[in-house]
Amino acid sequence: MSKIKKHYQCNECGALHMQWSGQCSDCNEWNTLQEVIISKSSSRGQMAGDANKSISLLKNISAAETTRISIGLEELDRVLGGGLVAGSVILIGGDPGIGKSTLLLQVLAQLNTQSPCLYVSGEESLQQISLRAQRLKIDAGELRLATETRIETVLALAEQEKPHVMVVDSIQTLYTDSLSAAPGSVSQVRESVAQLVRFAKQSNTAIFIIGHVTKEGTLAGPRVVEHMVDTVLYFEGDASSRYRIVRAVKNRFGAVNELGVFAMTTQGLKAVSNPSAIFLSRHEQPVPGSIIMVTREGTRPLLVEVQALVDDSQGNNPRRVTLGLEQNRLAMLLAVLHRHGGLAMYNQDVFVNVVGGVRVTETASDLPVVLAALSSFRNRPWDHQLVTFGEIGLAGEIRPVPNGEERLIEASKLGFTRAIVPIANLPRKSVQLDMEIIPVQRISDIMNLI
């Protein structure tokens, strides 16, 4: 038998204390002690028995393909790496009202026709869930529902029903009797997730966990929770917008930064099969400051429109504003353009936006941003059949980006006929593209083009 003892651990330095105090005696930080559970075995023979467990060699372990369960939503299957893996734990977070509960209710409605599922809600009543299903016309009459916030009762219900897939909405509402802290606290969230992960691995049950986010947009609770689960998904997008984006920031069974696009309709979330089409304005006439960029999210090339507006500054400090891009990188690109291109914008306000609310983090956006800013500054539009991508270095060189050929093939499929790419990303002779490829090597090449 094991004895359960309660200690208090510092969130900053990790030191353990027998009693709670306002200040940690090791690192002198205030209000960092959180209640934790520490189990100590009272049987010495058990420790000796654990050492006798067999050790397996990696070469003797069968690397059989993991069986995946198709959810029925193509975009969500893509984000998860091809489907749902039995025994996996998926943590999904997003702003209030973004559609987390709606999406998972649709998922269970699809999967419940194949295998038993369980939806555990700690925030909504059974009547509220039923009203949502009726409003969205979701056929989930045989879905098992439960409203419970005590983690021990939740696991007892799961052991009784033996579901293949379970949803917990949300982790901030769960608590355990072993801790005296309030539900939603660091210790309660950490212990509840630990018990859910343990149950998922032992029973081979796939578990979706809904998590709240802070005002900064990160998942609320201890950071260790993201390390404990198998997959972390972020629900992005404006609640007032029609489109939603599900992004994988961690996935032990698939590619990281994979992207899934959904459209919110009167009947719930619908997968968008061709996301590039919704992010392209395709103006009737070419307009200054607009250019099409080929970015890459996970394993998918994605075409988005980058818009720039350069205008005379009315103040002493010109503004550098970006939406969907990193602001510090814009300042660096303008400095490189001044130093190696001879074009100064120190007295200009520069605004850059990625259409559709997409957040681009890769360096392939450097060349499109510079081309869009040059077009707006000179008031000369680029060809509306033109696409581009590339990284710009501090020495003024245009660096290649990964998977250049795949990006060009995707742009060619959508009807684009011209492309400005780094010279190192020129396609091989074996790749036949009906496009005019313009290679660039330095910033001076771009100045000659404009």
Image: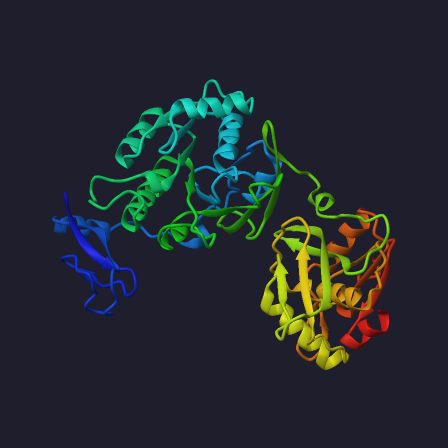
**Colour convention:** rainbow
Q: Which residue sits at x=72%, y=78%?
A: 338
Would you identify the image quadrant in which residue 75 lies? top right
- Establish if 358 lies above or below 102: below
Q: Is residue 433 above or below residue 158?
A: below
Residue at the front extreme, as displayed:
314
- Residue 25 is left or right of residue 444, and the answer is left
**In which quarter of the view is residue 347 placed?**
bottom right
| Residue 175 on image: x %, y % | 27, 40
Work out whether 300 lies above or below 361: above
Please give the name of the residue rendered at 37% of the width and 38% of the height, measured from the top-left corner: 200
Q: Quadrant of the C terminus?
A: bottom right
Residue 223 horizontal/vertical position (percent): 38, 55
Q: Position of residue 33 (x, y in %)?
A: 23, 58
Residue 393 visible (yes or no): no
- Do we see residue 407 in this rendering? yes
Residue name at image x 76 percent, y 69 percent: 424
Query: Which percent across, then down, holds residue 278?
Result: 71, 43
Q: Would you say 287 lies left or right of 261 here?
A: right
- The one nearer the camera, 170 or 417, is 170
Q: Which residue is found at the position 16% from the left and 57% from the top?
A: 20
